Image: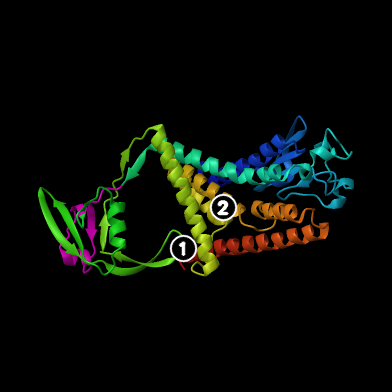
Amino acid sequence: MLSWLAPLLVLGLVIFVHELGHFLAAKWAGVYAPRFSLGWGAPLWSRRRGETEYALSWLPIGGYVRMASKEDETAQVLEGGGEAPEAEKSRHWDEHSMIPHGPHPIPADRWFESKTLVQRLVILLAGVTMNIILAVVVSTGVFAWYGTGYVPPVVDSIVAGRPAEVAGIQSGDRVVTIDGTAVTRWEEVLSKISAAPGTSVALELLRGADTVRVTVVPEAQETTTAEGARVVVGRIGVGVKQDVIRESVGLGEAAREGWRATWAIAGNVIGVLGNLLTGEVSVSQLGGPVEIARSSVAAAQNGMENLWSLIAFLSINLAVLNLLPIPLLDGGQVVLQVAEAAWRRPFPRMVKEWYARIGFAVIAALFLTVTFNDLKRLVLGWFGG
């Protein structure tokens, strides 16, 4: 039952950390932040500490930090959740969230725009930075707690008629060397075989107490990479024993593994985005909120290691996507701030409004697309399509 709460816990943590980054940076820079909310919409719960109201809102698909802005001399939402200009006079206006300044103008030196370019960029990039830190910390914790794991290169099954059977490889054989290079993990075997479609590969096998040498020619097979690209690799038609060997590591090694894992995830995400631009990956392959929820439940059911790994993965996804130069995202706001600095004055309000509208349209279109993909996969799964 608790596994069904995993989507809220996973997304809540990743988004909370992101918004916390913006909030802490705003406080550091002296920007007045009257509200810090996890979720959008009307608050279900709120509590005031000092000049900031902390809220848990009813729609748990995001969050925001409200910051004082010169634009309306009251408060600007950096990332969604904003009221319309007339909201101050409507019944929806929460004047208590403006304490200690109430309905009075915010002091000019507390505006977001009053800060230096460097301070504004720090605020804008703090969310992404916190997501990267979260991913590194979580990945480090996973390696420190669970250790590193690998699958030994022991053959479990042979597919009839495929290169492995033709070469004389048998179930139970352990691969010792490939082309004279010693191997101890199945991923090393897979890497070398994959890189040699149609090329002879010399294998040294341990069969019981005997050493056997064979030559196998991997057949070419098309597959999809982690970045979503279609590539041709070598395959020989064997299954491997899924007996994971665990090795404990110290905190230092865990930190190094966590760092490497984090940037490997980032590289995959960037690769997918690049392949989307070149057309190698279709938008129909992207997943959205339903897929995230499904993956969260599945990860929780498969153990805490999988759940924490998913948190690291989603945290890096959020970081990379927020760096895209799309209006309303952090990257788009960075572009706007730098462009205004280069122009040496703020852009007209109309320009900023259209810039925001374009960003909203792009994000809405992307959200609808990935949600449609999710529902399509869900329906096809139900009906066996």
Q: Residue at the location (46% across, 42% down)?
A: 259
Question: Is 166 included in the stretch rendered in magenta?
Answer: yes
Q: For mark 1, what is the residue?
A: 228
Characterize the local packing of mark 1: few (<14), some (14-19) or many (20 or more) Cα atoms within 10 angstroms: many
Can you say whether 269 is above or below 88 in the image?
below
- Of 301 and 176, which appears nearest the observer? 176
Q: Residue at the location (58% across, 50% down)?
A: 318
Question: Is 315 included in the stretch rendered in magenta?
Answer: no
- Of 37 and 50, which appears nearest the observer? 50
Amino acid type, label 2? Val
- Of 325 and 153, which appears nearest the observer? 325
- Of 123 and 96, which appears nearest the observer? 123
Judged by depth in the image, the label closer to the viewer, 1 or 2, is 2
The residue positioned farthest toward the left in the image shown: 210
Characterize the local packing of mark 2: few (<14), some (14-19) or many (20 or more) Cα atoms within 10 angstroms: some
Q: For mark 2, what is the residue?
A: 320
